[in-house]
Amino acid sequence: MTRASRTPISAATAARQLVLAGRWRTLPTRDTEAKIRMALRSRHPWVLPLLPTDAMDALVALGQPGGRCGWCHAPAGLPRNEVTSAILGDGCTSCRVAWEAAAAAVRERPHVRQLVAAGFRPEAAANLRTPEQIADYTRRLRVLDRAKLPPRPIPEPAYYQRRPWPAGAVR
Ligand SMILES: [Zn+2]
C-alpha cells in the first residue's frame, strides 16, 4: 500500500479485515480493545494513527461475538460516517429501520415546531403530515371557532317555579 493511499478509510477497511479474521482473539490480554490495538500495531502499524476514536469503538463492536451486525453492538450515539460505516457496514434491517425512524423524527421536528408556533397543539401537530391535512385541520378549527354555542336556557327564578296549590286541593 502506497503512502498516498493510506487514508482513514483505507485504515478502517484494513482494521475491519483484521478484526473479522479473528486471530487477535487469542492475544494474551482480556480487553477486546487492547487485543485489537495490539494486533493492529503488529500487523498494520500505519493504521492506528489514522483511526479516529469513533473507529476504535466501531472495531470493538465489530469484534463482539454473536451473529448480529456490528451496529447492533455499537455504543449508543456512535456517529455513522465514512469511517464507522467502512468498519461496520450498512447495518441490519432492524438498525436501518431505527435510523430511518430517527431521521424522520429529526426531519419533522422543525415542521412540528412551526405548527405548534402557529397555534396547533403538539399532539395534533405531530399527526399533520401534508399541507392538505394542515389546511383541513385549520378549516375545522375555524368552523369550531365561528360556531356559537346555543344560548343556554335561563333557569326560571325559584319563586316562579312554585306553583300555587290548585284550588280545592287538600292540604
Ligand atoms: Zn444491526
Image (cartoon, helix red, strand yellow):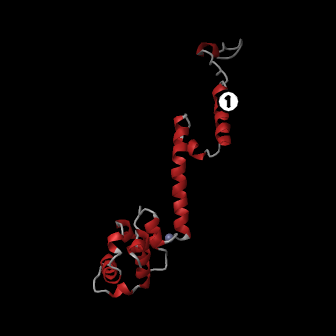
Say which amino acid is labelled 1.
Val
Identify the secondary structure beneath mark 1: helix
Could you tell me residue 139's position as x and y percent? 67, 33
In the rendered image, the vertical position of residue 19 relative to residue 119, given as above or below: below
Q: Is residue 36 visible?
A: yes
- Counting labels gives 1
Left/right placement of residue 111 relative to residue 86 reads: right
How packed mark 1 is, by other alpha carbons closer than 10 Å (few <14, some 14-19, many 20 or more), is: few
Q: Quadrant of the C terminus?
A: top right
In the rendered image, the vertical position of residue 133 relative to residue 13, given as above or below: above
> Pointer 1: what residue?
143
What residue appears at the point 55 percent right and 48 percent down from the top-left corner? Answer: 108
Could you tell me residue 144's position as x and y percent? 65, 30
Could you tell me residue 43's position as x and y percent? 35, 83
Left/right placement of residue 73 relative to residue 149 reads: left
Q: Nearer the viewer, residue 54 or 117?
A: 54
| Quarter holding residue 137 | top right
Dot 1 beta carbon under 8 Å from ligand 1: no
| Quarter holding residue 164 | top right
What residue appears at the point 55 percent right and 63 percent down from the top-left corner? Answer: 97
Q: Nearer the viewer, residue 11 or 22?
A: 11
